[in-house]
Image: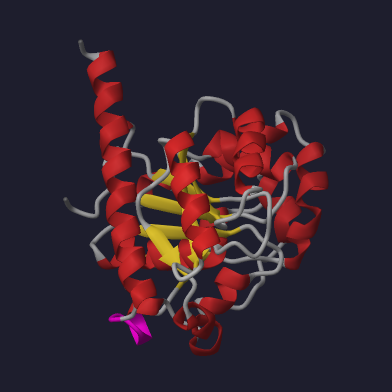
Amino acid sequence: MTAASPMRGRLCAAVVLATYNIKGGVGKTSAAVNLAYLAARGGATTLLWDLDPQGASTYLLRVKPKVKGGGERLVRGKSDASARIKGTDYDRLDLLPADFSYRHMDLHLDATKRPTRRLGRVLSPLEPEYDYVFLDCPPSISLVSESVFEAADALLIPLLPATLSARTLDYIDQVAGDGVQRLPFFSMVDSRKRMHRDVMEAFTAERPEMLRTVVPLAADVERMGMTRAPLEEFAPRGRAAEAFRDLWAEVTERLLRRASARTSVANP
């Protein structure tokens, strides 16, 4: 399978993938950066939009967390998003950086007409230029997250191997609607812990949409903050790098399967 978008032909638009969870500290940013890097390395033109005002993805990709005009002008359509995109150190991987003004993004969206569609409108003129757009989302249930659900084709949902993870997915099911595909996976897993193994086994039996790939709790992921680079750049042989390669292969397989199913329905 090539890295080019499995749904690329639907309107010559990018596939929009959002790393999302209600909770913080579950591995959203490491997933966004590593998967976007793998997509680009595989030949796909890729954009990562760092929507989190903390700017972790922006930091890891060595870009200044600043958007001229701030988030308000961007979501109100008064700022050209394409002019705010920055290149990274990696071929075919671009970044729309974080900005501290994103902390007020809910207020900016609420001041617009049809606020849940605003992020999609920002992305719309950019999508023909990319195979994939990744959204690194802040942890919340808010107007920003509702806008993400409208804009995204799929949610990549990292879950800790804990009993409360089931509640997290239940909440997301309540607010995300049927239009966006859910691709949850276990993150920060210590396979030596029986509790982690038991939770994953029970949860996977109840949730068939769970991806098979498990991202381990690994020092290499923490080292990303020191090296300011994706795992493939400094620890390609590590367990975490291997897990993200497997995860990306599984994500693209799921996307292709859904695209094929939609095509079959449209053309019986």
State yes or no: residue 156 in magenta: no
Magenta stretch secondary structure, dominant: loop
Above or below for 87 versus 18: below
The color scheme shown is secondary structure
Q: Is residue 84 visible?
A: no
Q: Give the image quarter of residue 259.
A: top left
Above or below for 206 versus 245: above
Of 29 and 117, the residue lying toward us: 29
The residue sitting at 41% across, 35% down in the picture is 208
The picture places residue 116, in percent across and down from the top left corner, at 67, 34
The picture places residue 94, in percent across and down from the top left corner, at 43, 66
Q: Is residue 120 left or right of residue 243?
A: right
Span shown in magenta: 233-237
Q: Quadrant of the C terminus?
A: top left
The residue sitting at 56% across, 83% down in the picture is 225
Q: Give the image quarter of residue 265.
A: top left
The residue sitting at 49% across, 40% down in the picture is 124
Above or below for 122 versus 71: above
Above or below for 88 versus 79: below
State yes or no: residue 235 in magenta: yes
The picture places residue 133, in percent across and down from the top left corner, at 44, 52
Of 236 and 186, the residue lying toward us: 186
